[in-house]
């Protein structure tokens, strides 16, 4: 038992140092390490491991957005993940804002505006959403 605790501690230590692959080898059941890698296959595996973990899904969606800067196909994965998040946390305005940003990034202005407007309904003083709507023209 003590060896197992030590192994988990070591995995957390490696994760904190950014050595995600080594952390995964020591504790393969921890989805957080997989999302941190930024590798799309590992992110997908983490989402399967913890499909209702809002924080983990938010991290996954953000990673997909990071990947999409270089490979636009990841915007679709981000959109899917933000839609999953909205099901789990329907009153969290930031998820609607990020979903709107994702739709705008793929050229779907109609859905983008709709999500930004929903973010403003949930949080009327959401300045980022207001500014973006002003820029794209409500």
Image: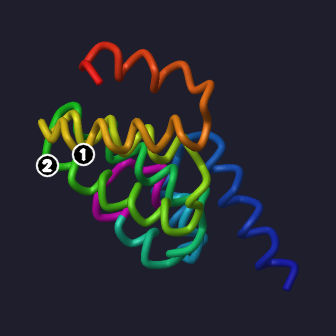
Question: In the image, is residue 23 above or below residue 121?
Answer: below
Q: Marks 2 and 1, how far apart in space?
A: 17 Å
Instruction: Find out whether residue 125 is within the magenta segment.
Output: no
The residue at the far right in this view is 2
| Coordinates of residue 76 in the picture (x, y in percent) | 21, 53
Disc number placed over residue 73 in the picture, else none:
2
Q: Nearer the viewer, residue 27 or 122?
A: 122
Q: Nearer the viewer, residue 71 or 102?
A: 102
Q: Residues within 10 Å of mark 1 (few under 14, many from 20)?
A: some
| Coordinates of residue 69 in the picture (x, y in percent) | 22, 31
Q: Secondary structure at mark 2?
A: loop
The residue at the far bottom in this view is 1
Residue drawn 44% across the image and 38% down it = 97
| Coordinates of residue 20 in the picture (x, y in percent) | 50, 52
Occupied quadrant, residue 80 = bottom left
Residue drawn 24% across the image and 19% down it = 136
Question: In the image, is residue 35 above or below residue 119?
Answer: below
Disc number placed over residue 111 in the picture, else none:
1
Residue drawn 43% across the image and 66% down it = 84
Disc number placed over residue 86 in the picture, else none:
none
Residue drawn 52% across the image and 65% down it = 24
Q: Secondary structure at mark 1?
A: helix
Q: Residues within 10 Å of mark 2 (few under 14, many from 20)?
A: some
Quadrant (top left, top right, bottom left, bottom right) of the C terminus:
top left
Occupied quadrant, residue 114 = top left
Question: In the image, is residue 86 above or below residue 70?
Answer: below
Instruction: Find out whether residue 40 is within the magenta segment.
Output: yes
Q: Main secondary structure of the magenta part?
A: helix
Q: Nearer the viewer, residue 56 or 31?
A: 56
| Coordinates of residue 73 in the picture (x, y in percent) | 14, 49
What segment carries the magenta color?
34-43
């Amino acid at each position: 038992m003590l060896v197992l605790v030590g192994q988990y501690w070591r995995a957390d230590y490696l994760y904190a140092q950014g050595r995600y692959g080594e952390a995964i080898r020591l504790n393969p059941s921890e989805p957080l390490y997989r999302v941190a890698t930024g590798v799309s296959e590992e992110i997908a595996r983490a989402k399967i491991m913890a499909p209702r973990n809002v924080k983990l899904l938010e991290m996954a969606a953000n990673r997909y957005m990071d990947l999409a800067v270089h490979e636009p196909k990841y915007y679709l994965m981000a959109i899917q993940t933000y839609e999953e998040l909205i099901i789990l946390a329907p009153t969290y305005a930031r998820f609607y804002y990020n979903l709107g940003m994702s739709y705008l990034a793929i050229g779907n202005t109609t859905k983008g505006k709709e999500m930004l407007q929903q973010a403003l309904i949930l949080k009327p003083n959401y300045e980022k959403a207001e500014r973006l709507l002003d820029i794209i023209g409500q």
